Amino acid sequence: MIARWSVPMPRSRVGRIGIGSGLVVGGVLGFLPVLGFWMLPLGFLVLSQDIPVVRRAERGMRLWYLKRKRRRNARQP
């Protein structure tokens, strides 16, 4: 589940790793037409299902974002 959306993922680990790797490679080529830098975070989210190193990094980024959001909301009157 990504934010509020639930996206069906392939059941096979090889399929998820292939899709995630393809999205990351496409994101690196984001300066080309059709491909975009939006593919990088999506690829890392897909890879975080199966690769522990990516999962830890994704979790750290999520916690950082939530702390930042909480601090911004606390500053607003």
Image (spheres, helix red, strand yellow):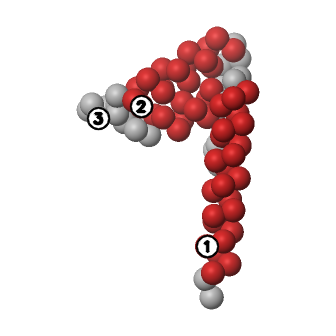
Residue 6 appears in the figure? no
Q: Position of residue 34 (x, y in %)?
A: 31, 32
Rendering coords of residue 18 (x, y %): 56, 15
Amino acid residing under circle 1: Arg
Left or right of residue 37, residue 77 in this image? right
Which residue appears at 69% of the width and 24% of the height? 51
Task: Tell me the distance, in whole angstroms, between the alpha carbons under discs 3 and 1.
Answer: 32 Å
At 68% from the left edge and 78% from the top edge, which residue is drawn?
Answer: 74
Residue beneath label 2, please? 27
Q: Where is residue 37 in the image (x, y as percent from the top left)?
A: 40, 38
On the picture, is 45 further left or further right than 39? Answer: right
**Which residue in the structure is indicated by mark 3?**
31
- SS of the residue under disc 3: loop
**Dot 2: few (<14), some (14–19), or many (≥20) neighbours within 10 Å?**
many
Residue for badge 1: 72
Residue at the image position 61 percent from the left and 29 percent from the top = 46
Q: From what the image shows, is residue 26 above or below residue 71? A: above
Specify whether residue 58 is in view.
Answer: yes
